[in-house]
Image (cartoon, rainbow, N blue to C red):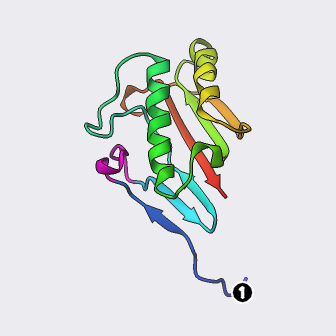
Amino acid sequence: MNESRPASRKETFVFAASDGVPPQVGPFAHATRLGDLVFLTGQMPTDPATGELVGGGIVEQAEQVRANLAAVLAGFDLTLDDALQVRVYLRHFDEHFEAFNERYRTWFAGPLPARTTIGVTGLAVGALVEVDVTAGR
């Protein structure tokens, strides 16, 4: 097909620990924006200041993931209530699904976004949970 395509309006963003966002654990941006949509890379339960995995179990790790997601979204003047789609990756699905859900419900003031939850055999840095978000206005 020989149709000409307009230049991409895609922008990528990398944040610093001073923004409250942990360093990446691989070669990727923290977020990509296309028009009014923002696609966040999966956030791990890592401390923004140290890049280290936070201690505790699924509840503590889920709360750190929430804080990390909120910090990236804040860079776009968005909050978790602007989430359109959420993907959750749980290392121990059967063991952590209910506990994660209890914490997850507190993340939103308004209606819950669409969500997929996937059980996985492992996550980077030994995390129990990773969450990525697509958000927009």
Q: Is residue 64 left or right of residue 117?
A: left
- Which SS does the magenta portion mostly show? loop
Q: Can you tell which quarter of the image residue 115 is in? A: top right
Compared to residue 126, the image places residue 11 above or below, namely below
Compared to residue 67, the image places residue 85 above or below, namely below
Residue at which label 1 appears: 3
Q: Quadrant of the N terminus?
A: bottom right
Residue 100, percent from left and from top:
58, 21
Residue shown at 64% from the left, 40% from the top: 86
Q: Quadrant of the C terminus?
A: bottom right
Question: Which residue is more in the foreground, 132 or 110?
Answer: 110
Q: Amino acid at mark 1?
A: Glu
Question: Which residue is more in the foreground, 15 or 129?
Answer: 15
Residue 122, percent from left and from top:
47, 27
Residue farthest left in this picture: 50
> Magenta segment, which residues?
16-27
Residue 52, percent from left and from top:
29, 32
Q: Is residue 79 left or right of residue 26?
A: right
Magenta-span inclusion, residue 11:
no
Residue farthest front in this picture: 109
Compared to residue 126, the image places residue 26 above or below, namely below
Q: Exactly how many numbered labels are in the figure? A: 1
Q: Secondary structure at mark 1?
A: loop
**Residue 126 can be seen, yes or no:** yes
Residue shown at 55% from the left, 70% from the top: 10
Compared to residue 14, the image places residue 115 above or below, namely above
Residue 13, percent from left and from top:
43, 61
Magenta-span inclusion, residue 25:
yes
Residue shown at 67% from the left, 45% from the top: 85
**Residue 122 can be seen, yes or no:** no
